[in-house]
Amino acid sequence: MDARQLRYFLAVVDAGSVHRAAERLYVAQPSVSQALRALERDLGSLLFHRTGRRLVLTAAGHALVPPAREVMRGLDLARATVEAVDGLLGGELIIASMPSQSVSPLAGLIAAFAAVNPLVRISVRAASTPADVGRMLTTGDAELGVVAVSPSTTALPGLAALHLETQRFAVLGRDEAALPSGDPVRPADLAGAALIVGQPGTGMRAVADAVRSAATGSRFVVEVEHREAVLPLVLAGVGIAVVSDSWRALARAAGAAVRALDRADSLEVSLVSRPGRLSPAAAAFHRLADAKAADAG
């Protein structure tokens, strides 16, 4: 058993087929098939049930996935640690983030990190919910994650969490005339409003649901999964959006009107990671985030 076999095995697990795994690995399909057969011979057990082109993990295959991921993480960590002996002169840091929090605080953290470590390439992977972030950390698709949850919820059980900030909620309108005059705006003041909302299962949507219940005659005019479309829809006059505070600066810079929402709801934003040692780039990012959070606190 060697690292290449484990890498090919995990690629098949994540891709769902040898063909797709080979494409992602940029190798010939027979190379992946041969590596899997060699791995099964070494272990003395079948790792997949083969049904036509479809592969389903056996019990042995399921058992191999966690230790295989740990082996690959250890190799990646070893490589990154050696490369960082003379400083962070390259490499990649992958961060999974929920959409609103990628606007803030993640954008500011990346700007500060890149100013000090310009040769580290940062990839931000989109995740709609905290559970999505957790899955990406578990599978190794990301090393750090940014999540936002209600104060009564644990960020993600089993993961280490660094609190970054607390975000409240606001409403956005195309211009001042599109919003009630008060600040903060009470939900009841939005009676009859056309609301632009996020998908169910998010903190932003939960607050929008509460606003619609309190605002007589209000309605959801657009439900959007791609939260980057929220501000353009607001600026086009389609409706009013209920968003987290992370959108405030961007919305004002774009010319939208912003009001605080008079509700006690909030989101606790955290930087999460798997327990254990981080790569040098991730550790440096974590230290920077910790310092920024301490300064803000």
Image: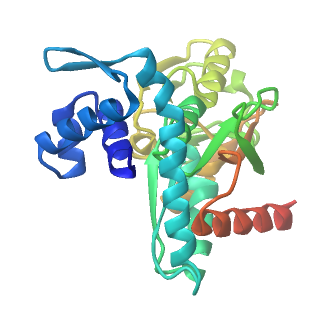
Residue 115 in the image, given as x and y percentages of width and height: 57, 81
Q: In this rendering, does residue 221 appear at all? A: no
Residue 30 in the image, given as x and y percentages of width and height: 12, 40
Scheme of image coloration? rainbow
Who is closer to the viewer here, 228 or 52?
A: 52
Residue 279 in the image, given as x and y percentages of width and height: 59, 63
Please give left or right for residue 90 compared with residue 274 in the image: left
Please give left or right for residue 253 compared with residue 297 in the image: left
Which residue does the image show at 32% across and 30% down from the upper left? 40
Please give left or right for residue 107 compared with residue 260 in the image: left
Which residue does the image show at 52% across and 69% down from the upper left? 80
Who is closer to the viewer here, 20 or 27?
A: 27
For the C terminus, the quadrant is bottom right
Q: Residue furthest bottom?
A: 86
In this view, 64 is above or below 249? above
**How many numbered circles are shown?**
0
For the N terminus, the quadrant is top left
Q: In this rendering, does residue 31 appear at all? A: yes
Which residue does the image show at 66% across and 25% down from the upper left? 207
Residue 110 in the image, given as x and y percentages of width and height: 56, 66
Q: Quadrant of residue 216?
A: top right
Q: Residue furthest right?
A: 297
Which residue does the image show at 22% across and 29% down from the upper left? 17
Who is closer to the viewer here, 112 or 173?
A: 112
In this view, 148 is above or below 145? above
In this view, 40 is above or below 271? above
In this view, 285 is above or below 218? below
